[in-house]
Amino acid sequence: MTSTGELERTLRANVRGEVDFGAAARALVTMDASNYRRVPLGVVAPRDAEDVTAALRVCADAGVPVVPRGGGTSIAGQATGTGVVLDLTRHMDAVLSVDPAARTAVVQPGLVLDRLRDAVRPHGLTFGPDPSTHSRCTLGGMIGNNACGAHSVAWGTTADNVTELAVTTYGGTHHRLGTGWAGAPAGLRELIAGNLAVLRTGMVPGVADGFSRRISGYGGLDALLPERGVGLARAFCGSEGTLGVVTEAVVRLVELPAAPVLVVLGYADESAAADAAAGLLPYGPLTVEGMAADLVRGATGLPRGGAWLFVEMPDEGAGRALLRAADALDATLLTDPAGQRALWRIREDAAGTATRTPDGSMAWPGWEDCAVPPARLGAYLRAFRRLLASHGLRGTPYGHFGEGCVHARIDFDLVTGEGVARFRAFSSDLADLVVAHGGSLSGEHGDGQARAELLPRMYGQDVIRLFGAYKDLWDPAGGMNPGILVRPARLDENLRFAVLPATPFAADVARCVGVAKCRTTEVGGPAVMCPSYRATGEERHSTRGRARLLHEMLAGEVVRDGWRSREVADALDLCLGCKGCLSDCPVGVDMASYKSEFLHRHWSGRLRPLSHYLLGGLPTWLRLLSALRLTRPAGSLTRLGLPLPGLTRERPLPAPAAVPFSRWWRGRGVRVGGGGGAVGAGAVGADVGARVVGAGAGAVVTVTLWPDTFTEHLGPEVGRAAVAVLEAAGLRVEVPRRRVCCALTYVSTGRLDTARAVLRRTLDSLDAPGEPRGPLVVLEPSCAAALRADLPALLPDDPRAHRLAATVRTFAETLEEYAPHWTPPRLDRPVAGQTHCHQHAVLGDAADRRLRERAGLTGELSGGCCGLAGNFGFEPGHHAVSVACAEEALLPSLRAAAPNAAVLADGFSCRTQIDQLSDRRARHLAELLAEALPTPTDRPV
């Protein structure tokens, strides 16, 4: 066999695309969205079909297996392998042509589904199959798994919507597949002719039985029957990369309904919803999706019930007819597209939501998509729940109830020997249960390694032998994705958790299940994740990619330098720490925290980059400049644009204010602190407990304004405005007299020991006699998020940390909670700007939205991340990504804003980015309100 080095050199000599056998490239593709992990030799990103041919020829000559890979969202392990992985997403991702009259499109395999849908939408067309991963799954992957999605009730599976395929097999032979025997490998026609009886009697259940979700194995093989028209392309669909590589496909398009409506039907429980689903099919639904309360978990806007069917109908008339016919407990019909999208988001996020049980434990794939005939669904689900209980397991079924396809993630223990044995036993029992109900082990995602071992229970040995012969005709050397479907690996081999150490950090990293919502390139709406991936398009800059690299770092097989890993450091370098993944990732991966932990360990005992000391120590430097009365000279230097060593030369540092907020506060003649009490062990009880001065109807609520570093030294005008507004609202404002800090800059640069020391000193300061008590009004969203989330995480054993975190309120939350009857001044003007990414991820902005509405500020703020992200935008090598993030949504929204629009950004980084990259001046909401108060705000001394 050829050596790895020789293989790499030969591929480089023959392939024009990228060939990468480095540790980082391999680590990124060891896993997909399944429980499995296999380590490849290298990764090839072919530029075109010629490159695919060259790579397959070189690998066949070397005897090295090949695995084609699209978005890597497969949940059964079929997108992982031990040889060479073909990354078809980097270059082979085009819509080659669209024929609206014929309703067809020609596409490459790496094309993301949503890009195809966007391309054909102007023609009133769409591609029918639509998995919940539509924003990142690829057409090649959908063909490989015969993907379906919610609309297959109306438009069928991927196999139903593919007319032609260009395929290259291991060794480099080309085939053009359509209808008829043209393009078939030698011997296939004779194989089918000799097995007609097996195909007609052994491939049950099937379409003839009204059951369209038989995806398992080579489930489309009976499409080669003469009475089925010899659908060669159709039979190839669902082969999971085991027969050859699709390099081009002609797909069928369907007419997009002009005004679909969503009917949501509420039922008493899951069984009632499942029993009702089949009865809705005669009314012509486009979708019939089901889920129960244990998945929805508090979502609003749903009708009464304990389970629901989401039924999309082609128009309002059909929807109302369904409402009249449905025997539901309660029902809602939505015609508004925005309202429909809001409810559909619950269903689309289910693949991630279901990965957590109600108590927060993780649940895993493995039995994600088995299907039974719709008429059997209610009985099957009742038996499924009993089977879970008998094995001591928990799971949350949901899915395509109109086609009997059930998704479920289950809280398997895939680490201990006992847990893995239970996983195997349950899998065997569930396979028998599915078969007993006339179902298919896979209903849309393929079998991969998770279920292929159990296929004989569904098909019998005659069909299994036919599958093997079919595979061998296409791939006689066995080089295409070995171990999948035919002669499969055991379902309890290659589990990805076995290589991890038993540490809390490893458990955090492992929670990434790979559904890759972070790989979406969609811009718009409030979502933030993942700005660096959208800027670079590289997997290593996605949340999933970084989690995979950390996983391999902990495993130590591919990434071997542990916490000193250069590969991990490089991938995390462009992480903005926006925390968008904390809220937008369906499983709540917190890459900002992982980055802090990595930097903490990576630089332990070593001299750090200068930026970590300059920007990480920003509170100390600014406090020192203020104490020495050097803020004016420092401001003059920054205005000259003189760069500091270790920082980027491409943007100036903000100038420190001549008069810090606290000095203004003292000069105002207001006592700092006071009130007899402390925010700490003795002062704050189980609730926030705002201090009330006086008694009765005239009592005044006292709030404590937190002097964060940015408000104190860089934007004191925000603090002055906040004081004016809070006092106008009838609140008494106090400020801590002793030095306090949320340690944000130390956390973001991974100086966690220093961060803990700073936070302990802060808690001690607030415990001192004479300090004010909560609630704490924190004007800077990143500081509020640090106090609310990072503080208790860094000091989990200090009860003061948790009590302090509970007192934190944003500016808008404070006014809403403690001055509910105050009427803000009316500004009555449009607004543009940015919702801070940490506010989106940790704090929420519902109170801000309500306050803006009451003040007459109309319009939406941009989502995403501004791109400056604290220290990130000032560090060398980050400027291009920083600007690219701002150009995604923020800067275009400012250019489109009306001339009289107020530009709003509560975060200092957001305001700085706007000031430096646009001709608009951004302000905090407190400033906008203060300017409109009946009396002028106080002026600085």
Image (cartoon, rainbow, N blue to C red):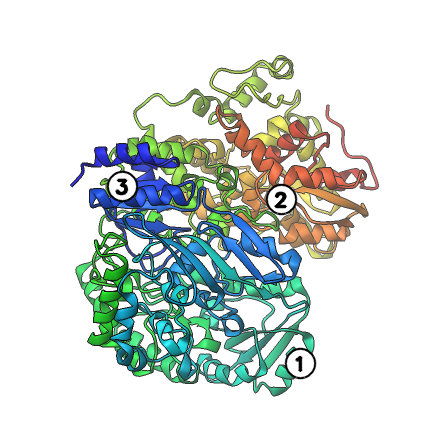
* Front residue of this view, candidates 380 and 318: 318
| Residue 289 locus on image (x, y percent) | 50, 72
Q: Does the rendering let one see residue 506?
A: yes
Q: Quadrant of the N terminus?
A: top left
3D distance between C-alphas at marks 1 and 3: 60 Å
Real-space Cα distance between discs 2 and 1? 39 Å
Mark sitting earlier along the chain (1/3): 3
Element at label 2: loop
Left or right relative to 395: residue 677: right
Earlier in the chain: of badge 3 and badge 2, it is 3
What label sits on residue 58 in the rendered view?
3
Q: Are marks 3 and 2 in contact (CB under 8 Å)?
A: no
Q: Position of residue 508 (x, y in %)?
A: 35, 49
Residue at mark 1: 320
Instruction: Please indicate whether residue 347 sits to the left or right of residue 860 in the image.
Output: left
Indicate the position of residue 57 as horizontal and vertical percent values. 28, 44
Q: Residue at x 45, y 54 (%)?
A: 138
